[in-house]
Amino acid sequence: MEVIITDGNEMMTMETFIAHCPEIHCTGCVASIVRSLGKLPGVEMVRVDLDNQDVRVEYAAERISLAVVRERLIAAGFPPAN
């Protein structure tokens, strides 16, 4: 957990979610995940490790829940194994 202060003096708690998604097979999968998660309000960063089939998401816990991040990942066709 990391607390940051935004330009509006608002304090937000940044959380990190790492998911292993065995359905990741190509750069198209990577692009799909980044596109799907990256546009969610509160998601600050999405990184996908194609070789290890891992997705790392940093998000503001006050703006979006982990459940919503997971649901969007599943809806994109990449259900986490963990």
Image (cartoon, helix red, strand yellow):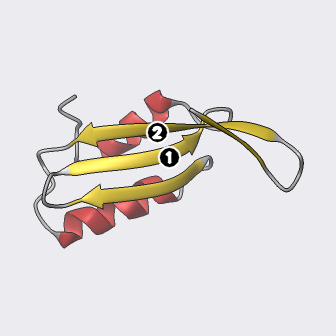
Q: Residues within 10 Å of mark 2 (few under 14, many from 20)?
A: some
Dot 2 lies on which element?
Answer: strand
Tell me where residue 46 appears, x and y as whole percent: 43, 56
| Residue located 53% across and 58% down the image | 39
| Residue located 30% across and 49% down the image | 55
In the drawing, does residue 22 fall left or right of residue 70? Answer: left
Query: According to the image, label 1 marks what residue?
Result: 58
| Residue located 62% across and 49% down the image | 41
Residue 74 lies, with reference to residue 52, above or below; the image says above
What amino acid type should be assigned to the residue bearing mark 1?
A: Glu
Tell me where residue 38 appears, x and y as whole percent: 48, 58
Task: Please identify the quadrant where the N terminus is shown.
Answer: top right
Upstream in sequence: badge 2 or badge 1: 2
Residue 48 lies, with reference to residue 15, above or below; the image says below
In the drawing, does residue 27 fall left or right of residue 3? Answer: left
In the drawing, does residue 62 fall left or right of residue 64? Answer: right
| Residue located 22% across and 28% down the image | 82
Disc sitting over residue 37 in the figure = none
Q: Residue furthest right?
A: 9
Q: Residue furthest bottom?
A: 27
Disc sitting over residue 16 in the figure = 2
